[in-house]
Image (cartoon, rainbow, N blue to C red):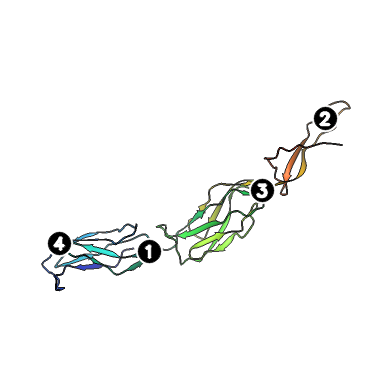
Amino acid sequence: HTLSALLVSVEDQYNNVVTSDSSNVTIALTGGNATLGGTTIVAASNGVATFSDLALTQSGNYTLDASDGSLTGTTSSGFIISPDSASKLIITQQPSTTTAGHTISSVIVKVEDQYDNVVTSDSSTITIALASGNATLGGTKTVAASSGIATFSTLSLTKAGSYTLGVSDGSLTADTSSSFTINPDAATHLVFTQQTGNATAGQTLGALEVSVEDQYDNIVTSDSSNVTIAL
């Protein structure tokens, strides 16, 4: 949004406005890494330069400096740029590779305006769900933002595989996480996954397959232990 008009007077040593002055006055941010938009060089009219279309898109605290050649410059009083209205969700801390049944590292979601500022006044409810992968997501899946940030710290999955997560909040633009992997938990049991059928005496039985699985029935693909078969 446009800042309120800023007036800069060109004065003499006695603080009189030099009404005959029409020199160029330049306005700039005192510091910081934001970009000041609008017309930043204005010719004085009757000794007064009016900056009427200045704008900043990055929220924060600012002051402005006015300069004009060799004249002594001046600095404005401080002012605040607040975030615009909420427009989108951004996942700023992604889920990481985790073992089945264990808690996934915290997923952090920020509510931002159109200019990528966190809307610190926002306390709306954000929902997280699987965006890809066929499983049941455990943990607290609905969290109210605090100062524009929602943290999902209790999520878990028991089915091994690759997944992504999606976050939503009403009409705000949603976001999808990067892909992450759920690895099998430690091996706990054996399961016949291919049975042998009837056979003739002396003939080789049909192939028999045994899977090494974890407590959640995921095949422990890293397992290379010896499996023994017996009657």
Residue carrying label 3 = 159
Against 195, residue 106 (above or below) is below
In the rendered structure, which disc, 3 or 4, sits on the residue that comes first in sequence? 4
Query: Is label 3 in contact with label 2 (beta carbons under 8 Å)?
Result: no
Query: Of circles 4 and 2, which is in front?
Result: 4
Q: Along the line of sight, which residue is nearer the eye, 20 or 187?
A: 187
Q: Which disc, if any, is residue 205? A: 2
In the rendered structure, which disc, 3 or 1, sits on the residue that comes first in sequence? 1
x, y percentage for residue 17? 15, 71
Cα distance, mark 4 to mark 1? Answer: 31 Å
Cα distance, mark 3 to mark 4? Answer: 72 Å
In the rendered structure, which disc, 4 or 2, sits on the residue that comes first in sequence? 4
Task: Residue at the far right: name it.
Answer: 201
Whether residue 32 sits left or right of residue 215 in the image: it is left
Cα distance, mark 4 to mark 2? Answer: 100 Å
Residue carrying label 1 = 60
Query: Is label 3 in contact with label 4 (beta carbons under 8 Å)?
Result: no
x, y percentage for residue 96? 57, 50
x, y percentage for residue 87? 45, 59
Query: Is label 2 in contact with label 1 (beta carbons under 8 Å)?
Result: no
Q: Residues within 10 Å of mark 3 (few under 14, many from 20)?
A: many
Q: Residues within 10 Å of mark 1 (few under 14, many from 20)?
A: some
